[in-house]
Image (cartoon, rainbow, N blue to C red):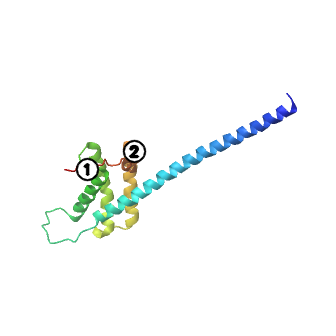
Amino acid sequence: MTTVTTYLERLQQAADRAQSAETACRREAATRIAVLERERAFAFRRMNLMRSVADAAKPQMEDDSDPAERSGEEIAVARALALLRVRLGWSSDSETRDATLAHFASVVIALYRASGGAEMPDETSGIDDALGRFEAWYEEAHGASFWMLFDNPMQDTPRVDF
């Protein structure tokens, strides 16, 4: 081999190493961006859903109704769970859906109590704890984040003109 050939091979090796380093960096960056994108999406889904659920779980003005009727907390839970069903597009029941709604009820109860329906020592941590327990239960039970349920877009209903 000539000196020039050896020199050119070293340059080729250096170029290949630089290309490999760039490719690895781009792969790592793409992975990190995907993680951050998912975290952002879940954070906004969490905020938007919890804002709607908090509104549905707000204590309503109590009237002098029959005490045998449902309590304000029960009504708030029913309203919030109905809202969750609509947001997820759940128009039918299943064992999995019923379990999810039953576990999510504790989040609604924490919101209701923090909204003035009852006293709680630290309202914010109570809500965070309830939501955290729900998210952990869902992930353990289903092997995926609850917030992935919102990845499934609702099907458009075809418009029919008569």
Q: Image quarter for residue 94?
A: top left
Please determine whether, in this image, residue 58 is positioned above or below residue 3.
below
The furthest residue to the front: 162
Q: For mark 2, does the 10 Å Cα neighbourhood hold few (<14), some (14 to 19), or many (20 or more) residues? A: few
Of the two numbered discs 2 and 1 in the rendering, the one whose residue sits closer to the viewer: 1
When asked about the image quadrant of residue 57, the answer is bottom left
Above or below, 51 against 42 in this view is below
CA distance separating discs 2 and 1: 40 Å
Task: Point out residue 89 in the picture as x, y percentages from the top left corner.
Answer: 29, 50
Question: Badge 1 is on which residue?
Answer: 159
Nearest the viewer among 65 and 155 is 155
Q: Which mark is residue 132?
A: none
- The amino acid marked with disc number 2 is Glu
Residue at horizontal 14%, vertical 72%? 64
Earlier residue among tags 2 and 1: 2
Using the rendered image of the protein, determine whether residue 124 is visible from the camera's viewpoint: yes
Q: In this rendering, would 111 be left or right of 44?
A: left
Residue 43 point in image, percent of width and height: 44, 57
Residue drawn at x 36%, y 52% is 134
- Name the one closer to the observer, 14 or 56: 14
View extreme (top): residue: 1
Name the amino acid type tagged 1.
Answer: Arg
Which residue is labeled 2 in the image? 140
Quick one: 48 or 81, which is closer to the camera?
48
In the image shown, does 162 or 50 lie closer to the viewer?
A: 162
29 horizontally vs 160: left or right: right
